[in-house]
Image: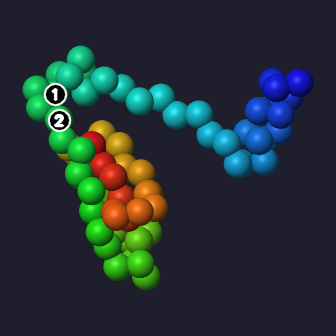
Amino acid sequence: MIRQRVQRLVDDGVLQFVAVTHPLRTGYHTMALIGVKADGHRLREIANQIAALQEVIYLTIASGAYNFLGK
């Protein structure tokens, strides 16, 4: 029953599974979690620019004090 509900959420695009690597075990010697505040009208543009940086392992849109959290 749970498996079917999860599958339906995945099929509907509501739920997505993502793998996250361990930065220190993949050759990075330091790591930082960075919060970014951005202009609400340019969120997609800014997210694409940040995500394009080679040093960015992952970037997520957040609610709260910051618009993005990146590592």
Percent coordinates x, y for residue 33 in the rendering: 24, 44
* Secondary-structure class at tag 1: loop
The structure residue drawn at horizontal position 83% and vertical position 38%, both measured from the top left corner, is: 8
In the depicted view, which residue is nearer to us: 12 or 1? 1
In the depicted view, which residue is nearer to us: 32 or 47? 32
| Horizontal relation, residue 44 to residue 37: left or right | right
The structure residue drawn at horizontal position 43% and vertical position 57%, both measured from the top left corner, is: 62
The quadrant in which residue 37 appears is: bottom left
Q: Nearer the viewer, mark 2 or mark 1?
A: 2
Q: Residues within 10 Å of mark 1 (few under 14, many from 20)?
A: few
Instruction: Say above or below: 65 vs 38.
Output: above
The structure residue drawn at horizontal position 77% and vertical position 41%, both measured from the top left corner, is: 9
Instruction: Say above or below: 4 vs 37.
Output: above
Measured Cα–Cα span from mark 2 to mark 1: 7 Å
- The amino acid pointed to by label 1 is Tyr
The structure residue drawn at horizontal position 20% and vertical position 22%, both measured from the top left corner, is: 24
- For disc 1, the marked residue is 28
* Secondary-structure class at tag 2: loop
Tell whether label 1 touches label 2 (CB within 8 Å): yes
Is residue 49 visible in the rendered image? The answer is no
Percent coordinates x, y for residue 15 in the rendering: 67, 42
Percent coordinates x, y for residue 12 in the rendering: 78, 48
Is residue 37 visible in the rendered image? The answer is yes
Q: Residue furthest left?
A: 29
- The amino acid pointed to by label 2 is Met
- Residue 31's tag is 2
Q: Identify the image quadrant of the C terminus.
A: top left
Instruction: Say above or below: 41 vs 48.
Output: below
